[in-house]
Image (tube, grey):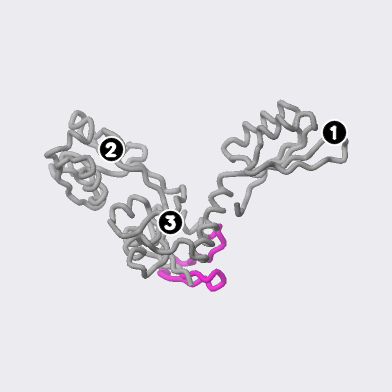
Amino acid sequence: MLRIAVPNKGSLSGPAAEMLHEAGYQQRRESKELRIVDPENEVEFFYLRPRDIAIYVSSGRLDIGITGRDLLIDSGANAEEILPLGFARSTFRFAGKPGTARGIEDLAGLTVATSYEGIVAKHLADHGVDASVVHLDGAVETAIELGVAGVIADVVETGTSLRNAGLEVFGEPIMKSEAIVIRRVGAETEEPKVQQFLRRLQGVLVARTYVMMDYDCRVEQLERAVALTPGLESPTVSPLHNEGWVAVRAMVPSKEAQRIMDDLYDIGARAILTTAIHACRL
């Protein structure tokens, strides 16, 4: 039975559970549940603190985990990313009072406050910068005001909270994070149960990214239409009862669907429809 770690709270928890549900796995009904068994899919789920998941997976006690890339790197655990999941995206950056620094090279001799000591220490070391790192939990913006640090390193989304604290970001991003699937370094990723799990999640990702598009067009416009909707391998083309017309079906990126529909209409395609994809295997 495959043993999988899932975030039990925070920004990773809800989207992870939703993706697993879309992939056909049972999920807990009560937030207090710490473990459930899905016998039909031969999977056992453990609901753990997101920061602890990489440690459990690296120990070999659990086969797979869903966590954040930032949490994996910060943990220093012997685990590796095997699939990005596309949600809970964030950017990790340095910030300070205006004029404090322009780049990482200006941090030499300063103290950096952060909740992600492992990430920051590694980033500074990789760039050969000798700076102190102090670990704080929670909002680190006040560390500068209270004189604990000269600079902070934190997740930046809109930057509103930083501006409200009189701070500004500087330098290049330290890293970009998102939810990921992790596996212990050296573990067998070709194991059938692991591959099945990954295929299911990849199917959800594709289903969220594409829509199915159907339309009718005249034969003489088919090549132009197919150029707009090449599909993944190639579109399905079927003759219609009315001579000189064909029906076309292809997967198209959902973000481009409206533009593609306009372009198809302009070349004479009609009965253009899009439908959601709930699951797929590529």
Secondary structure under tag 3 reads: strand
Label 1, on which residue? Answer: 244
Q: Which residue is mark 2?
A: 162
Q: Number of marks in the image?
A: 3
Q: Is residue 157 above or below residue 78?
A: above
Residue located at (50% from left, 58% from top)? 198
Q: Are marks 1 and 3 in contact (CB under 8 Å)?
A: no
Q: Is residue 141 visible?
A: no
Q: Quadrant of residue 108?
A: top left
Label 1 sits on a secondary structure element that is loop
Label 2 to label 3: alpha-carbon separation: 30 Å
The part of the chain drawn in magenta is 21-44
Say what amino acid the circle numbered 1 marks. Answer: Gly
Is the residue under label 3 in contact with that under label 2 (CB below 8 Å)? no
Percent from the top left, x then y, of residue 281?
Answer: 60, 54
Horizontal and vertical percent position of residue 174: 29, 41
Which residue is painted at 20% across and 33% down in the image?
A: 97
Residue 106 in view, yes or no:
yes
Which numbered disc flags the more N-terminal residue, 1 or 2? 2
Labelled disc at residue 38? none
Q: Is residue 234 shown left or right of residue 7?
A: right
* Marks 1 and 3, how far apart at CA: 49 Å
Query: Which residue is tagged 3?
Result: 181
Q: Main secondary structure of the magenta part?
A: loop
Q: Is residue 144 magenta?
A: no
